[in-house]
Amino acid sequence: MPKKHYRGAASLLAGACITIGLLGAVGLNIRASLLRPLPVHYSNEVPEPEGEPLARIYFEISSAELPAEAGGPIQTVKEKSEASPHDIVLISGYHDPSGNPEQNAALAMQRALAAKAALVAAGVPLERIRVRKPEVIPGDADLQEARRVDIRVQ
């Protein structure tokens, strides 16, 4: 699968506005780099997740907007990544099997990219962040688990 290097302008602007609002509320510095497209790195170069996630962010139904409480987990990941400068930050987005699988995967990716933008705005170097291809949660699982992003420093 080819790497995706940009999102639509409207999606990017909306994501930047959401991120700026969230991060401004928690007092983190916003860098102008948010206004340019963030590359998505997912392919064979993205490793499998190891262990439990350091942070888990849950989203509202049909939404990729970072919740207000995401500032704490983002800060935790930033601090861990600073303490582990040779590790990567791995973001995994999830979705459920109901409905249109392409739309669900796209929403899971938008959620992962919202987390990525917040991490970059918090000061995590872009080149250390990897985004995994969205994964499906089994149909019998709690659907809230399908509306999440896991973040690891490994």
Image (spheres, helix red, strand yellow):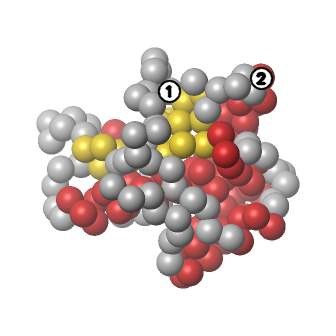
Q: Quadrant of the C terminus?
A: top right
Quadrant in the picture for residue 107: bottom left
Image x and y of residue 80, in percent: 71, 26
Image x and y of residue 11, in percent: 52, 75
The amino acid pointed to by label 1 is Pro
Count neighbours of disc 1 (C-alpha within 10 A) and say few if under 14, some if 14 to 19, many if 20 or more.
Answer: some
* Residue hosting label 1: 53
40 displayed left or right of 30:
left
137 displayed left or right of 44:
left
**134 to 61, vertically: above or below:** above
- Measured in 3D between alpha carbons, the distance from the residue under mark 2 to the one under mark 1, in whole angstroms, is 16 Å
* Residue hosting label 2: 83
- Of pointers 2 and 1, the one earlier in the residue sequence: 1
Taking depth in this image into account, of 143 and 83 the one nearest to the observer is 83
Taking depth in this image into account, of 65 and 108 the one nearest to the observer is 108
Viewer can see residue 60: no
Which residue: 66% across, 61% down?
19
Taking depth in this image into account, of 78 and 98 the one nearest to the observer is 78
Image x and y of residue 39, in percent: 57, 59
Q: Quadrant of the N terminus?
A: bottom left
Viewer can see residue 132: yes
Number of numbered discs overlaid on the protein picture? 2
Q: Are marks 2 and 1 in contact (CB under 8 Å)?
A: no
Which residue: 73% across, 36% down?
78
Which residue: 28% across, 59% down?
104
Image x and y of residue 71, in percent: 68, 45
Quadrant in the picture for residue 10: bottom right
Residue sticking out furthest to the bottom: 10
Which residue: 38% across, 54% down?
108
**53 to 12, vertically: above or below:** above
20 displayed left or right of 144:
right
